[in-house]
Image (cartoon, helix red, strand yellow):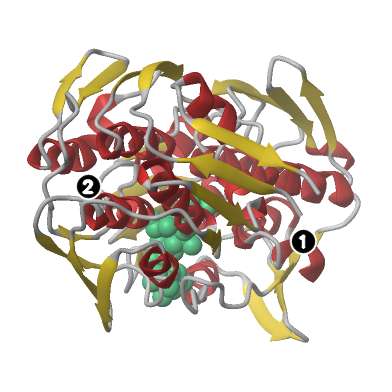
């Protein structure tokens, strides 16, 4: 199994380009199932999760063409099955995103129910209930969500919980429903807005995406389009923390700074000097040790749960004490025991981590448990004395394109070891 070996202690300096967003590209690829015309998506990041979704579309019979300039064209006119099998869904929960498009366009879907995962139980009741309100008939049988429908009918759907992929699934389905759908308490994440922009390019009538009320006028048919996916705000935030934690100075190109306002505000509070342009951000820590910052995660535009583990690493070596409260997922602190093995002083009480910053961490073999936890262990390794070996890095390959190459380009001593 591949590992990352990091020798800590090097401040990061230089420039890198941020890749396309994982959490935007996955729903956009699922949206290609809403039309029988070709859809071409640009700025596709080279990630395991993208490969998994492409395999799923291919297994269903879609014709998928991957271009070496990292664009993907999908033609769903050749679909032969409407099944997302357990074997694929268990490796990537976001496979649930095909449920809405399949039932809206083809009138049937058979999608394995995702189980819990390392960060929480993560039910999909809002997806199912919302589709039922749009007129789908749904049974859960043998671990599969079996949905059938004639043409879906628009409805007013108030979601109990703000859910990103739930909002995306229902917004996609509503595009082909008869009449008007209103999604209330919708997720406001930039990835929801990016999906809406792609759907509008396909001919959908969507208003309010990016706010908590989205209105969709259904149409009988959507057409093909070409769409460029937005940059990955979580990758950007992770690299900014990497520079801050090592006392370095980096510039990120090809990003939308306003999408990471909450992260930038916390990094400034930690002592970083940050300047932003239209599509770049520069962070300068001037060799200083970061100051501890308190964090509470919440849906966008609040502080993202996907940046919580990285800030746990920052606070672990910061000056002062801090608390980090995780309010989106119930079990997203699997990185804490691993960081404590590296000399961090972090105490967990329910969904809050109490952190006393230490001057130095010490390199150790550590185990990645999920995507963002693995990123945080790499960050900890960048500041630790000696060598840190991060195991199970298939988690990191799901969501970070060439992380070791980008970090090495910034001066980190990091390499991938294959047995
Ligand atoms: N929830 C329910 N019922 C539902 C749906 C969600 O109770 O039907 C709960 C979840 O259990 C959780 C909360 O609502 O406690 C929010 O979950 P959400 O549905 O928003 O998460 P998601 O859509 O499954 C996406 C991202 C995650 C990111 C979260 C929160 C994708 C593919 N995944 O997941 O990304 O953490 O939103 O922002 O967009 C990651 O990239 O590392 C990652 C985990």
Q: Residue at x 70, y 37 (%)?
A: 35
Q: Residue at x 38, y 40 (%)?
A: 238
Residue 223 can be seen in this image: yes
Disc marking residue 88: 1
Provide residue 22's location: percent of width, then percent of height.
54, 40
| Circle 2 SS class | loop
Disc marking residue 50: none
Q: Distance of mark 1 from mark 2, alpha carbons?
A: 31 Å
Q: Residue at x 74, y 49 (%)?
A: 52
Q: Quadrant of residue 275?
A: top left
Q: Quadrant of the N terminus?
A: bottom right
- Binning the other alpha carbons within 10 Å of mark 1 as few (below 14), some (14 to 19) or many (20 upward) gives some
Provide residue 72's location: percent of width, then percent of height.
72, 26
Residue marked by disc 2: 301
Query: Which is more toward the observer, 82 or 325?
Result: 325
Q: Quadrant of residue 219?
A: top right
Q: Is residue 79 left or right of residue 341?
A: right
């Amino acid at each position: 199994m591949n590992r990352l070996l990091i020798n800590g202690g090097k401040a990061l300096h230089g420039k890198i380009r941020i890749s396309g967003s994982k959490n935007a590209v996955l729903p956009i690829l699922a949206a290609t199932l809403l039309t029988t015309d070709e859809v071409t998506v640009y700025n596709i990041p080279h990630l395991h999760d993208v490969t998994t979704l492409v395999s799923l579309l291919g297994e269903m019979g879609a014709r998928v063409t991957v271009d070496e300039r990292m664009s993907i064209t999908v033609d769903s006119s050749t679909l032969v099955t409407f099944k997302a099998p357990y074997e694929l869904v268990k490796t990537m929960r976001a496979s649930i995103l095909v449920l809405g498009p399949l039932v809206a366009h083809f009138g049937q879907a058979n999608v394995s129910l995702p189980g819990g995962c390392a960060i929480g139980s993560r039910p999909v009741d809002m997806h199912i209930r919302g589709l039922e309100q749009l007129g789908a008939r749904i049974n859960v049988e043998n671990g599969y969500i079996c949905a059938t429908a004639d043409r879906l009918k628009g409805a007013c759907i108030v979601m109990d919980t703000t859910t990103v992929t739930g909002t995306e699934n229902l917004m996609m389905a509503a595009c082909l429903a008869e009449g008007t759908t209103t999604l209330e308490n919708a997720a406001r994440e930039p990835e929801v807005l990016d999906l809406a922009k792609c759907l509008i390019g396909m001919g959908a009538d969507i208003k309010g995406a990016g706010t908590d009320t989205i209105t969709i006028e259904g149409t009988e048919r959507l057409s093909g389009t070409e769409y460029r996916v937005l940059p990955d705000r979580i990758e950007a935030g992770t690299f900014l923390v990497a520079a801050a934690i090592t006392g370095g100075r980096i510039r990120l190109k090809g990003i939308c700074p306003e999408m990471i306002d909450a992260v930038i505000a916390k990094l400034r509070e930690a002592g970083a000097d940050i300047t932003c342009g239209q599509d770049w951000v520069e962070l300068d820590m001037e060799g200083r040790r970061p100051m501890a910052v308190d964090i509470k995660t919440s849906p966008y535009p609040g502080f993202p749960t996907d940046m919580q583990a990285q800030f746990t690493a920052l606070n672990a070596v910061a000056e002062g004490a801090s608390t980090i409260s995780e309010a989106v997922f119930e079990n997203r602190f699997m990185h804490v025991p691993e960081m404590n093995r590296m000399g961090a002083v972090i105490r967990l009480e329910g969904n809050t981590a109490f952190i006393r910053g230490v001057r130095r961490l010490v390199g150790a073999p550590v185990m990645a448990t999920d995507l963002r936890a693995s990123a945080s262990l790499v960050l900890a390794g960048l500041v630790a004395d000696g060598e840190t070996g991060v195991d199970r890095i298939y988690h990191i390959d799901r969501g970070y394109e060439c992380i070791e190459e980008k970090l090495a380009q910034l001066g980190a001593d990091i390499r991938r070891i294959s047995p």
